[in-house]
Image (spheres, grey):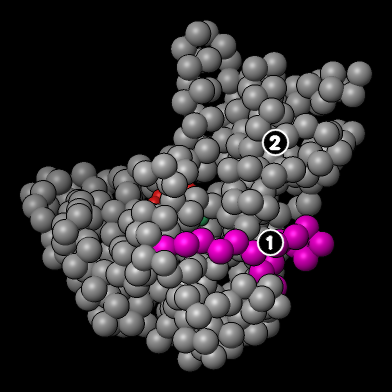
Amino acid sequence: MKEIPPSSTLKVLSLAKELEHQGKKIIHMEVGEPDFDTPEHVKKAARDALAQGLTKYTPSLGTPELRNAITEHLKEKGIETEMKNVIVTPGAKHAIFCAMVATLDPGDEVIIPSPCWTYEAMVRIVGAKPIFIETTRENEFKIEPEKVEEALTSRTKMLLLNYPNNPTGAVMTEEELRPIADLASDRGLWVLSDEIYDSLVYEGKNASILSIPEMAERTIYVNGLSKTYSMTGWRLGYAVAPIELISEMNKIQQASTSCAASFVQAAGVTALRGPQDFIEKMREEFRKRRDEIVKRLNSIDGIDCPKPGGAFYAFPSIKDLDISSLEFCELLLQKAGVASVPGSGFGPYGEGHVRFSYATSMKNIKEATEKIKEVVEELHK
Ligand SMILES: Cc1ncc(COP(=O)(O)O)c(C=O)c1O
């Protein structure tokens, strides 16, 4: 257990809650969830499902209705798959977990581009070893095939991709993914592709590695409804993988959670099949906020913020401030009442950055950036 790092986002959140409890006003820019409500027609579908008595276990792979809706939804994104290749889980996180338990042996190595989300804990829980490779601002935080190649050993079992990326917002084109796909095929690696932010892309289009035809046999595609439909608390995710792996992942699901909640799955069908205009509205709002927060952060001396292509995080460099990311976040929390996540929480290459979620109101973004400016000006004195 000593080797398993706790979630730094949740650590900041509990500290921020403690300050709030003491009466301090906190602007929450640490949490990774849309501040929009779940669309009303989706909530109604859950209420209807409950009224109809959908309150029992479902098949552990998920209901056929939802697995079907997922395959059709993916088809619209250019991903061809079949219902037998789909498993529904309580959140994308559990899909990732089932996949890792099913594929990794102790000592196996997983290549993870960093800055990265909290995959390390899951890899370590199964006794495997994370091998971090750096993604850089100069290369827009995209994974580089040469670095993957350098990190390969005889123990490499899996390559982890997360585009659009949390925390950097990086997106990948199909052209950029091809050499990565070739490498994975040549070396017989699993590719776990977490595409949970794929509907929140502001420039161009994020390509899925699963849309490269020969990749279906080695890809575990993970997605969910948390971010796209603002359903974080509902806990609904899914994975697409080769049928043999799906049945192994199903054993993990049967031994851990049995299935995702029945009425939540029914609401999931409505979310995927119902009107999709909610997503466009949310994306447009996030785009405005992204532009505002990036402009405002860049106006602060010592902060350098690239424009993220996707997701809802700004990930500026604070390297010129000569302070660790943890100290800076503590300062922001104590002096400005702004909660953010230190870059050191995103793998070994996150230090020197801070993550601000812009899934908060424009008013909060304006107020927070004013306060951040004051704290930085104090630091310069
Ligand atoms: C990159 C990434 N993957 C997965 C998840 C978890 O998604 P879910 O709520 O479906 O478990 C998150 C949540 O923050 C995330 O940022």
Q: Is residue 55 above or below residue 8?
A: below
Check disc 2 and report its element: helix, strand or loop.
helix
- The residue positioned 54% from the left and 91% from the top of the image is 186
* Observer able to see residue 361: no
Note whether residue 81 is visible. Answer: yes
Asked if residue 46 lies left or right of residue 323, the reply is left
Which residue bears the numbered disc 2? 325
Tell me residue 97's x, y (percent): 35, 59
Q: Residue at x 58, y 55 (%)?
A: 116
- Does the segment drawn in magenta span residue 136? yes
> Is 248 situated above or below 231?
below
Residue 88, image x, y percentages: 28, 64
Q: Amino acid at mark 2?
A: Ser
Horizontally, residue 56 falls left or right of residue 144, namely left
- 21 to 304, vertically: above or below: above
- Residue 337 or 218: which is nearer the viewer? 218
Q: Which residues are magenta?
A: 128-144
